[in-house]
Image: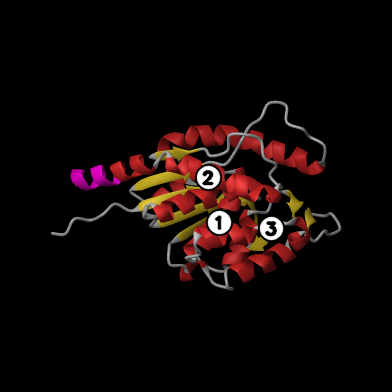
Amino acid sequence: MEQRKPKVGLALGSGGARGIAHVGVLDVFEKENIPIDYIAGSSMGSLVGALFALRHSATDLEELASLFKRKYFVDFTVPKMGLINGKRIEELIYMLTQGKNIEDLEVPLSIVTTDLQKGRSVILDSGSISKAVRASISIPGIFVPVQYDGKILVDGGIVDRVPIQAVRNMGADIVIAVDVSFFPKDPPITSIYDVIMQSMEIMGREIVESKWLQADVLMRPILKQHSTVAFQEIEALVEQGRVEASHYVEDIRRRILNWEEKR
């Protein structure tokens, strides 16, 4: 009987622009031939995960990240349910993902969102990639929520900042989690965006800490403060992801080998 190889799952966490660090992690995995069989992403992690699942190389992803500048996706609206309409960013994501559905992806993907009315996570694993990602990145108060299948969906990071259990539920035997959060002391708060993002950071901190034991490999590439909207820091963020992932390559290989030997 042929030995089954373990399925490796990747949980990509939320963190705004800091999620660009996920690209550096994926770059190392590509170069080191670390297999990824399942991906679950929350907020920015869902976008990076979707593009990777489309078989974009890490180099492509780094180039695509340059498109995420405010002038390309900010479409202000009269405040009612959010400051930014979100139509422009959904159109940009639609273009980047070639208008495909989640079920069309070569690597199975789960996109984590939050049901604003029920207060629980909603996992999207079929339907429009752009609509699902748009929902997962919809920071409450900033982006207008997404109406989807009778639900009002917002940022997945509210209830599941690093979707470890989500990728485990997909069938992953070994789970690699990447948390791109950072909790500085006395962060500068000068705008409504800072107020909202810092509030989300505080809410998400305890949730993340309580879930770490569910992962086999835990990565935290962000070692200094980066603004969640500082998309001009792409190279530095990608490099932090590379450095962090390089520390875990041998550990991941050893876990894969040991899993096979135990079977």
Label 1 element class = helix
Distance, label 2 to label 3, CA atoms, is: 18 Å
Residue labelled with disc 3: 68
| Image: 214 above or below 7 | above
| Image: 116 above or below 52 | above
Q: Quadrant of residue 146?
A: bottom right
Quadrant of the drawing holding the N terminus: bottom left
Give the image location of residue 144, x and y in percent. Answer: 74, 57
Give the image location of residue 229, x and y in percent. Answer: 71, 47
Q: Residues within 10 Å of mark 1 (few under 14, many from 20)?
A: many
Residue labelled with disc 1: 48
Give, as a three-letter code, the residue at label 1.
Val
Distance, label 3 to label 1, CA atoms, is: 12 Å
Q: Which residues are magenta?
A: 256-263
| Left or right position of 94 against 31 | right
Give the image location of residue 113, x and y in percent. Answer: 59, 53
Q: Is residue 239 magenta?
A: no
Give, as a three-letter code, the residue at label 2.
Gly
Q: Residue at x 76, y 56 (%)?
A: 70
